Amino acid sequence: MKVFTAFAIFILSLTHLNALSLKIGVTAGPHAMIMEKVKELAKGEGIDIQVVEFNDFILPNEALNNNEIDMNSYQHQPFLDEQVKSRGYKIKSAGKTVLMPLGIYSKTYKTIADLKEKSKIAIPSDPTNGGRALKLLEKEGLIKLKPVDNPSVLDIAENAKQLTIIEIDAPQLPRTLDDVDAAVINTDWVLLAGLDPHTALAIEDKNSPYANVFAIRDDENRPEVEQVIKLYQSAQIKDFIKEKFKSAILPAW
């Protein structure tokens, strides 16, 4: 019996040593929930995923660039492009994940038409999501922008209702709803705050160019990384997303 136990421990130790391990950075909320499901599938493929949660949009790329994690899943392509350009990161996208539509939310008004003159509207403070929010406000007829790819508040050409645009860190936007007339919020922060995405006064449609992506380092070539991406983009994960989030989050692949 003792010999068998020692042998079993030896075999288990070999299995542990041979297991492939990956640290994957995500933001708290839906991205983390989806990755936990991928982790279950990956275990069956001999890949041990450690899900590392972050509570902001900057640190996951910094950690990836500094070799503290192996890949991340939380950002859309324009945000990644801006980060690489402004911070000099040696990272790139490696496949699409999900679309988390940006929406306009309010505790005061029921429709966009109800917004009064000089209303206060909060938007994300980072450049790409801020520009994305301004484009949604323009689409809803609240402002008009100069013809630039990624607008800022300085690019507002017309503001007939004299709206006050307030820039806030994206994770904090749900908390501002008691203090502003409306806020433009990413779906992941909406869900994390316990809000219902279906209550949005307006929301991006499925044709949004802001699909989220995996990010990896430029020199990444390990097959287990590619395997995890394939597992994420599988029918099992697509079904999980549809069932779990009730169309509030959309598979983007």
Image: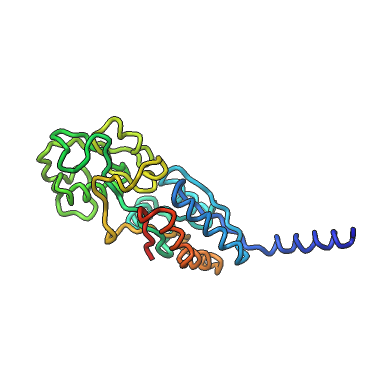
| Quadrant where the N terminus is found in the figure | bottom right
- Given residues 1 and 118, the one toward you in this image is 1
Of all residues, the one furthest to the top in this rendering is 179
Residue at 35% from the left image edge and 53% from the top image edge: 248
| Quadrant where the C terminus is found in the figure | bottom left
Horizontal placement of 101 versus 52: left or right?
left
Identify whether 159 is placed above or below 78: above
Report how many numbered discs are placed on residues in the image: 0
Task: Return the x and y of residue 212 as percentages of the image width and height.
Answer: 38, 57
Residue at 29% from the left image edge and 45% from the top image edge: 199
Identify whether 61 is placed above or below 230: above
Please say whether residue 110 is visible from this viewpoint: yes
Please say whether residue 65 is visible from this viewpoint: no
Identify whether 48 is placed above or below 30: below
Task: Return the x and y of residue 28 as percentages of the image width and height.
Answer: 46, 46
Which color scheme is applied?
A: rainbow
Residue at 24% from the left image edge and 45% from the top image edge: 201
Task: Return the x and y of residue 241 as percentages of the image width and height.
Answer: 43, 58
Where on the picture, by quarter, is residue 223? bottom right
Residue at 43% from the left image edge and 64% from the top image edge: 94
Horizontal placement of 183 versus 188: left or right?
left
- Given residues 242 and 96, the one toward you in this image is 242
- Given residues 19 and 86, the one toward you in this image is 19
Identify whether 70 is placed above or below 161: below
Task: Return the x and y of residue 13 as percentages of the image width and height.
Answer: 75, 60
